[in-house]
């Protein structure tokens, strides 16, 4: 299993709907997780971090972490066309934490 | 809001030449990183740097690559004897501590001809 895995999509949702993005991880990563958004041709932009089991909400975004299932997700409520981007899940390598593993990203399109 | 800045935004170089990519991390950050993203592929870790030395490096970061913090603000990635497959977007990032959220610069698009 790769360190961090994502379904590459593409995922399409209508405007106003909830977009659900998922990520699984292996034992080779530390259990801190970061969601980044990357617009085409741009750099990754940090959206949220989550460190403990359960949900963490920030505006329209909710990150969910389930350590038992080694699963982390990002929910985007009231999706907007401006949310159309690739979403990257990232986690530090277990141990020093100085190397981040990134998933391949899930491409999201929000249809007006 | 403080940000990571990278120069140049685009670098075109002949194969075999050396390139230096430059970065200014966020001023109070202690950890610095270089990542690479080949077009259409995932972001790949190259190297992390802390306390004026390499903290970790990936298998991609071979003898062709080196990093340096020549002064109190700049952080550079040198690629010697460039190859066609070095063409990619190179991102610099920084964080306050190891394992903490990393903040990325806008990247340098490197094109090797």
Image (spheres, rainbow, N blue to C red):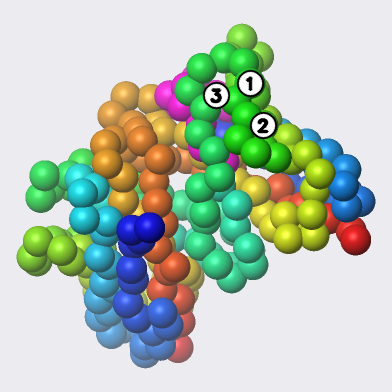
Residue at the (8%, 65%) spot, across then down: B71
Callout 1: residue from which chain?
A
Badge 1 vs badge 2, beta-carbon distance below 8 Å:
yes
Q: Position of residue B35 (x, y in %)?
A: 40, 56
Q: Say if A63 sits above or below A36 in the image.
A: above
Sequence-first disc among 1 and 2: 1
Regarding residue B68, the answer to whether it shows in the image is: yes
Q: Say if A72 sits above or below B32 in the image.
A: above
Regarding residue B79, the answer to whether it shows in the image is: no
Residue A89: name its quadrant: top right
For the residues marked 3 and 1, what is the alpha-carbon distance in whole angstroms?
Answer: 20 Å
Who is closer to the viewer here, A72 or B110? A72
For the residues marked 1 and 2, what is the alpha-carbon distance in whole angstroms?
Answer: 7 Å
| Element under disc 2 | strand
Residue at the (60%, 46%) spot, across then down: A88
Q: Which mark is residue A55?
A: 1
Q: In the visual, does B66 lie left or right of A23?
A: left
The residue mark sitting in front, 3 or 2, is: 2
Q: In the visual, does B69 lie left or right of B17?
A: left
Q: Position of residue A8 (x, y in %)?
A: 73, 47
Q: Position of residue A46 (x, y in %)?
A: 51, 47
Q: Position of residue A50 (x, y in %)?
A: 52, 27
Is residue A41 highlighted in magenta?
Answer: no
- Residue of label 3: A26
Sequence-first disc among 3 and 2: 3
Q: Which mark is residue A62?
A: 2
Badge 3 vs badge 2, beta-carbon distance below 8 Å:
no
Residue B99: name its quadrant: top left
Which residues make up the magenta segment? Answer: A23-35
Residue at the (72%, 55%) spot, across then down: A83
| Element under disc 1 | strand
């Amino acid at each position: 299993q790769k360190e961090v895995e994502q379904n590459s999509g593409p995922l399409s949702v209508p405007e106003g709907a909830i977009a659900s993005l998922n990520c699984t991880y292996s034992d080779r990563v530390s259990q801190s997780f970061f969601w980044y958004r990357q617009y085409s041709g741009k750099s990754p932009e940090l959206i949220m971090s989550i460190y403990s089991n359960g949900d963490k909400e920030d505006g329209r975004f909710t990150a969910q972490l389930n350590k038992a299932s080694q699963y982390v997700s990002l929910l985007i409520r009231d999706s907007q066309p401006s949310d159309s981007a690739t979403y990257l899940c990232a986690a530090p390598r277990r141990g020093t934490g100085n190397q981040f593993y990134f998933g391949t990203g899930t491409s999201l399109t929000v249809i007006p | 809001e403080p940000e990571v800045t990278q120069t140049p935004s685009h670098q075109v170089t002949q194969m075999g030449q050396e390139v230096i990519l430059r970065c200014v991390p966020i001023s109070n950050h202690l950890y610095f990183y270089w990542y690479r993203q080949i077009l259409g592929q995932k972001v790949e870790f190259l190297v992390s740097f802390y306390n004026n030395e390499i903290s970790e490096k990936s298998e991609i970061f071979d003898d062709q690559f080196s990093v340096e913090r020549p002064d109190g603000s700049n952080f550079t990635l040198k690629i010697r004897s460039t190859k066609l497959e070095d063409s990619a977007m190179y991102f610099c990032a920084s964080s306050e501590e190891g394992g903490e959220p990393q903040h990325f610069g806008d990247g340098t698009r490197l094109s090797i001809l």
